[in-house]
Structure formats: structure tokens, C-alpha cells
Image (cartoon, grey):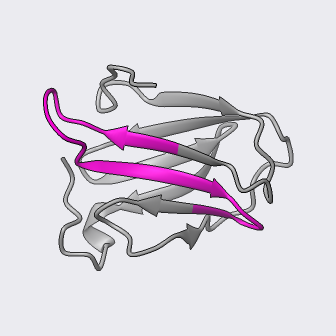
């Protein structure tokens, strides 16, 4: 599904019922006004919840905090000029600062 959305102007909310261990994924691709995708975030529900940020991480990494216990979750993704933030049910679970990446192609767009 492609949705025209301005992530810089408004946080994106996605509701899931995926359980850790289900091997399901949430994939959000970032596009400019016209053209090819230039970034993405993937949340992967393996034995532990993991994330991958295209052009900023080399591989999947564990979400660094414990998730709320509810299986029905509302994920809020916010992109600023300096970071990509993810909340689960109002609790911040990731604050990825672009400048802290060791990948040289990781630049905010």
C-alpha cells in the first residue's frame, strides 16, 4: 500500500497486532515528492523486536528498550531533521540520531 504522507509535518501511526516471535514485519519506505525510495525503517518481530534503517544501519539491531506487554500496539514514527523516533503505545522505544550512525550514507533527507 502506498500512502502519500508528509512524515516531517506529521507523525505516522500504524496499529499492529503482531507478537514478538511471529516473524512478521512492518516496513515503511520514504520517498521524495517524486522518484525512488531513499530510505526506510523495518520493524521485525523475531524472538526479539528488531529494527533496520536503510542507509543508516548495516543490519537489524534489537530495539533497545522493553516493549509494553500489550499485543495490540500503536506505533508512532516521527522524522525530524536530526533523528527518526519510534514510540509504541506512547512509550519511546527508539530515538535514532542520524549523525551517530557509522554508515557514511546515513544522511537526513
Judge whether 9 appears above or below 75 on screen: above
Name of the residue lying farthest toward the left: 34
Query: Which residue is rendered at x = 61% and y = 37% of the image?
Result: 75
Query: Which residue is rendered at x = 29% and y = 32% of the image?
Result: 8
Camera-side residue: 107 or 99?
107
Camera-side residue: 80 or 19?
19
Name of the residue lying farthest toward the top: 4
Left or right? Give the position of 77 relative to 92.
Answer: left
Q: Position of residue 40 (x, y in %)?
A: 37, 49
Judge whether 102 appears above or below 33 on screen: below
Question: Within the image, what quadrant is residue 55 found in?
Answer: bottom left
Magenta run includes residue 86 = no
Q: Position of residue 78 (x, y in %)?
A: 42, 39
- Residue range highlighted in magenta: 27-50
Left or right? Give the position of 3 relative to 31.
Answer: right
Magenta run includes residue 34 = yes
Amino acid at each position: 500500500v502506498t500512502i502519500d504522507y508528509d512524515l516531517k509535518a506529521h507523525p505516522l501511526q500504524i496499529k499492529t497486532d503482531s507478537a514478538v516471535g511471529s516473524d512478521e514485519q512492518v516496513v515503511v519506505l520514504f520517498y521524495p515528492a517524486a522518484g525512488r525510495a531513499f530510505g526506510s525503517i523495518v520493524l521485525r518481530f523475531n524472538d526479539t523486536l528488531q529494527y533496520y534503517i536503510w542507509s543508516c544501519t548495516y543490519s537489524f539491531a534489537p530495539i533497545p528498550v522493553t516493549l509494553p506487554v500489550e499485543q495490540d500496539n500503536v506505533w508512532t514514527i516521527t522524522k525530524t531533521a536530526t533523528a527518526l523516533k519510534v514510540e509504541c503505545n506512547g512509550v519511546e522505544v527508539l530515538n535514532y540520531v542520524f549523525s551517530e550512525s557509522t554508515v557514511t550514507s546515513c544522511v537526513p533527507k
